[in-house]
Each structure stands twice: as structure tokens, then as C-alpha cells.
Amino acid sequence: MNDIQYPLDVREYLYKILVIGDVSTGKTSIIKRYVHNIFSMNYKSTIGVDFALKVIQWSPDTVIRLQLWDIAGQERGNMARVYYKEAIAALVVYDVTRPKTFEAVKRWKADLDSKVSLPEALGGGPIHTILLANKIDLQENGNGSPNAEEMDLFCQEHGFLKWFATSAKDNSNIEDAAQFLLEEIMATEEALGYKQNNDAAMLERVQLSQSKAKEGCC
């Protein structure tokens, strides 16, 4: 007899997360490190789009499946709208050793906001987005390190939830960034569930009140 007990009422979520930014900012390396815990100096530039899947046991009764879409740095035109469709979150990546890639961040964020938003079921508005200041392992004696106060202000002004200084090579802060983003996504899900439960309870009370009123009538 099979005595294996399978958990009941397991909730499964599938989330599409975009990874965008200029060419050679390390987007593919970040995904490979997060999903497979590997790093290589020989990745070729992504052409078009690629994606990877990571499955996370979020809690005993919750499984999250992440689709991380690696969008080529050249893709910020009409095709990007197709790639962005149904995304719920994004990582915008720049290279701390190349200031021009940081200058491009605002354009990537504006393009993102113009092409995709959260579904109405999750409240609408911009999708959850964080900024990754990548390749900190290449800084020399701290030169070019992001200024925390300036970065915090930049994120507030341009709609980023938070920023992280990362390195795919050293595996610095990539797990922390992904964990933060997932917590934000799940908090939205939980808030939605709480609202739906409250709405259902309110409707039930109204219906009960109406029913009692009819019973007392005449």
C-alpha cells in the first residue's frame, strides 16, 4: 500500500519576469547565476529573446514558477511589446563600469511602462520593477560605486521599488534582489486575496440582511 501523503490545496503561481537593459550589461549572466548557479565569461549577446524557468517552493503549500525572459539589449521597438506581454515584474540592468548604460535606464523604464502594466485583477499600474547596478566585481578600488542616497532618490523618482549592487561572477546580491521582488509580488497577491475575501464577506452580509428584511416584510 502506498503511504505517501501528498499535500492538499497546493497553490501554484506562474510569473513572467523581464530582464532588460543595454547590450552586454550582464543580463544573461544574472539569469544563469540565479537559475543554474553558474557563471561564464563566454556568453554571446542574446538575439531577440531567450528565457529560463526556475521553480521555487515558496512555502509548504505554495509553489512559484518563474519565467525569466532575457530580452536583447537592442529590443526596445515594436517587438518589445510582444515580449513584454503578461509580465508581472522586471529587472532593469546596467553596467556600473559603463555610465552610458545607466543613462539608458530611464529610457528602458519609460518603454516598459508604456508597453505593459499589471492586470486589473492585481490592481493595475506599473509592474513591479527593480534596478540592478551590475558588474561591481569590475570596480577598481571602489571607483564608480553607486552612491546609495543618489540611487535611492533615482528609484523614487523613476518608479523602481529598490536597487541592488550585483555581480553574477561573485554571486553578489542576486538572490537578495530576486527574493525582494518575489516578496513584493506575493504581497500583492495576498492583498488581492484579502480584498476578495472581504468583498465576498460583505456581499454575504448584504444578501443575508436583504433576506431577513424580506422575511420580516408583511
Image: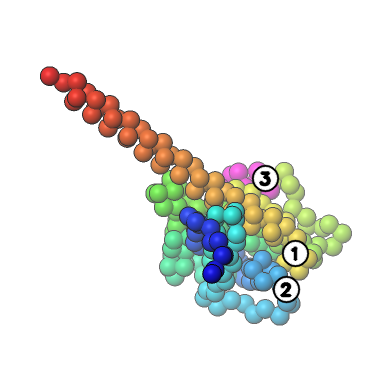
Instruction: List x then y, in percent, for residue 213.
Output: 22, 23
> Does 85 appear in magenta?
no
Question: Marks 1 and 2: CB-CB under 8 Å?
Answer: yes
From the image, which quarter does the C terminus lie in?
top left
The label nearer to you, 3 versus 2, is 2
Distance of mark 1 from mark 2, alpha carbons? 9 Å
Q: Which SS class for mark 3? A: helix
117 displayed left or right of 42:
left
Residue 39, label in figure: 2
Residue at x-position 40% and y-position 49% = 121
Residue at x-position 50% and y-position 66% = 76
Q: On screen, 162 above or below 96? A: above
Residue at x-position 45% and y-position 52% = 118
Q: Which residues are magenta?
A: 151-160
Could you tell me the amino acid type at mark 2? Phe
Instruction: List x then y, in percent, for residue 83.
Output: 47, 68
Mark 3 crowdedness (10 Å alpha carbons): few <14, some 14-19, many ≥20: some
Relative depth, front residue between 118 and 73: 118
Mark 2 crowdedness (10 Å alpha carbons): few <14, some 14-19, many ≥20: some
Evaluate whether residue 17 shows in this view.
Answer: no
